[in-house]
Each structure stands twice: as structure tokens, then as C-alpha cells.
């Protein structure tokens, strides 16, 4: 039973039996994995608060052949973002949605340093008080792109013609980009301004993008595009998507923006 050391984010936790906890982890070295922390729910657990969601930890675990769950031996806090989620209902809902995107679109046991850096930079930007809506839209674009689902809006998937700089692109229900002729103008419209915003997201870190975020209607259109892609990929909605968007609309005030992840 080999021993592994890793750096990881705690994405989700579940109760197991009376005193144990199952954790879904995004590790830098081994990708997404699930582990059991025996005794983690005891009052005097050796894990303390290490296994709270949105905490970055230094992790030691055992892996046994043929078992889906690893056994978490030890964990130490590197950085915790749990307080940010607890202090703001909107930030908490945003982090929950970010966690769901990671859980749904990351395959098990496949390392992805770009996703780990994206998650690190986005959570850091949350902690700096950046615009939450802009950060979530930023994370959506990058997460879905890295997972291979975000459409390339530079050309039509139907006729293959490149998209003219000043022309709209139409996104069909399967996430494919179409020109006006191929779509008949009946799909989700991505204006040149939306395409420019996506290009900015792909060129900047989250904190920088959020610092000069686009107007709310453009962020809403990015949200609609993400919803279309998620529905097609998962064949269902994510409850955390609807919850975050509802809560932030109820509490929204003019705010800040994002940057790229390095």
C-alpha cells in the first residue's frame, strides 16, 4: 500500500458512518481523487479543520490497488478559503458552484496543473474582494475550455467559414458555433463584444479581468452560454448554478473585476 504526498484542494465532503468523512480532493500531482479520513468527525480529531471545503492542504494518503477510495493519513492547512464562503452567502454559493464544476468536469486520477492553477488564482481573487460574478464567469469559460467543451467561436461548425470580426456567431443547442446563414438566427447569439470578452478571459488572469469587468449584460450572456454547454455535456442542470445566479441577482451591487491565472 504505497504512501503518497500531495498538495490538494478540498472540493466536497460527506459524512461516513459515525465518525468518518469522505473527501473529494483536487490534487496537483494526481488530479481528482476521493479519500476516507477515519475519525475526522470526532471532537478531538487529528485533522482538526483541515478537511473543510475550499481549504488547500498538504496531504499524505495511502492507495490500495482495486480500491476507489484512498485512505487519508495526514493533512496540514496551506491556506483556507472557508471563512470567505461562510462570511458571504453569495461567495459561498459561488465557491460551491466552482467546486461542482471541478467535480463534474475533471476525470478521476488525471493530473491537470492548469486546472489547479486556475482554481488557486480564482479562490485568491475571491479573497481579494474581486467581483464575484465576473470571477465565476471567468472560471466557467476556462474550466469548460480545459475540459474540452467550450466552443471555438472563430469559425462556423456548419460551413467552416471564419467568423467576420463584426459579425454575430450563433451557438446551437449542442454547443456548436454557427454563422447567421447556417443557424438561421435561431440559436444563442454571441455578439462581437461577447467574443472579445471571451478573448480577454483567455488572455488575462482572473484578478485582472475582474478589475475591469464587462457590463452585467455581457456577463449574463456568458452565463447563458455556460448553461447551454453544461446541459449538453451533463444532460442535466447543476443546482449550484441556479442558486448562485439567483443569490447574486438578489444582492448585486456595482462591483469589480478579474484577471488571468499564471
Image (tube, rainbow, N blue to C red):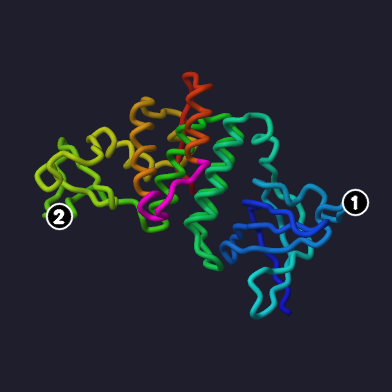
Q: Is residue 114 magenta?
A: no
Q: Is residue 32 left or right of residue 55?
A: left
| Residue 192 higher or lower than 146, as above or below | above
Q: Which residue is mark 1?
A: 44
Up the image or down, 247 lies above or below 173; here it is: above
Asked if the stretch drawn in magenta spans residue 236, the answer is yes
From the image, which quarter does the N terminus lie in?
Answer: bottom right
Relative image position of residue 242 (x, y in whole percent)? 48, 37
- Lateral position of residue 147 relative to residue 43, left or right: left
**Farthest left residue?**
181
Residue extending farthest to the top is 253
Which residue lies at the image location 28% right of the left edge and 52% below the top edge?
174
Label 1: element kind: loop
Q: Which secondary structure type mostly characterizes the magenta part of the structure?
A: helix
- Residue ID at (52%, 67%): 110
On the picture, is 239 further left or further right than 21? left
Q: Going from the N terminus, do you reach mark 2 or mark 1 first?
A: 1
Image position of 232 (left or right of 33): left
Q: Which residues are magenta?
A: 230-240
Where residue 95 sits in the image (x, y, percent)?
A: 57, 41
Q: Quadrant of residue 126?
A: top right
Q: Between 184 and 215, which is closer to the camera in this rendering?
A: 184
Relative depth, front residue between 197 and 181: 181
- The residue labelled by disc 2 is 158
Q: State the CA–CA distance, disc 2 to disc 1.
A: 61 Å
Nearer to us in this view, 91 or 115: 91
Asked which secondary structure carries label 2, the reply is loop
- Tell me, yes or no, whether the two marked residues, 2 and 1, touch with CB atoms within 8 Å: no
Amino acid at each position: 500500500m504505497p504512501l503518497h504526498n500531495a498538495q490538494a484542494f478540498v472540493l466536497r465532503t460527506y459524512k461516513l458512518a459515525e465518525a468518518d468523512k469522505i473527501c473529494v480532493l483536487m490534487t496537483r500531482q494526481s488530479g481528482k481523487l476521493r479519500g476516507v479520513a477515519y475519525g475526522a468527525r470526532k471532537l478531538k480529531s487529528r485533522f482538526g479543520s483541515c478537511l473543510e471545503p475550499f481549504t488547500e492542504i498538504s496531504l499524505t494518503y495511502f492507495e490500495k490497488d482495486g480500491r476507489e477510495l484512498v485512505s487519508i493519513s495526514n493533512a496540514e492547512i496551506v491556506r483556507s478559503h472557508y471563512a470567505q464562503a461562510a462570511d458571504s452567502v453569495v461567495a459561498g454559493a459561488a465557491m460551491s458552484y466552482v467546486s461542482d464544476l471541478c467535480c463534474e468536469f475533471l476525470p478521476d486520477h488525471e493530473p491537470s496543473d492548469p486546472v489547479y492553477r486556475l482554481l488557486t488564482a480564482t479562490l485568491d481573487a475571491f479573497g481579494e474582494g474581486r467581483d464575484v460574478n465576473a470571477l465565476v464567469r471567468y472560471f466557467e469559460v476556462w474550466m469548460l475550455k480545459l475540459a474540452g467543451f467550450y466552443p471555438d467561436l472563430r469559425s462556423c461548425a456548419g460551413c467552416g467559414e471564419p467568423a467576420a470580426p463584426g459579425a454575430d456567431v450563433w451557438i446551437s443547442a449542442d454547443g456548436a458555433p454557427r454563422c447567421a446563414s447556417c443557424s438561421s438566427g435561431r440559436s444563442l447569439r454571441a455578439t462581437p463584444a461577447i467574443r472579445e470578452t471571451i478573448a480577454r478571459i483567455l488572455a488575462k488572469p482572473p484578478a485582472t479581468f475582474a478589475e475591469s469587468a464587462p457590463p452585467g449584460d455581457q456577463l449574463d450572456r456568458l452565463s447563458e452560454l455556460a448553461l447551454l454547454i453544461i446541459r449538453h455535456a451533463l444532460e442535466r442542470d447543476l443546482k449550484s448554478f441556479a442558486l448562485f445566479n439567483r443569490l447574486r441577482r438578489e444582492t448585486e451591487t456595482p462591483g469589480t473585476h478579474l484577471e488571468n491565472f499564471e
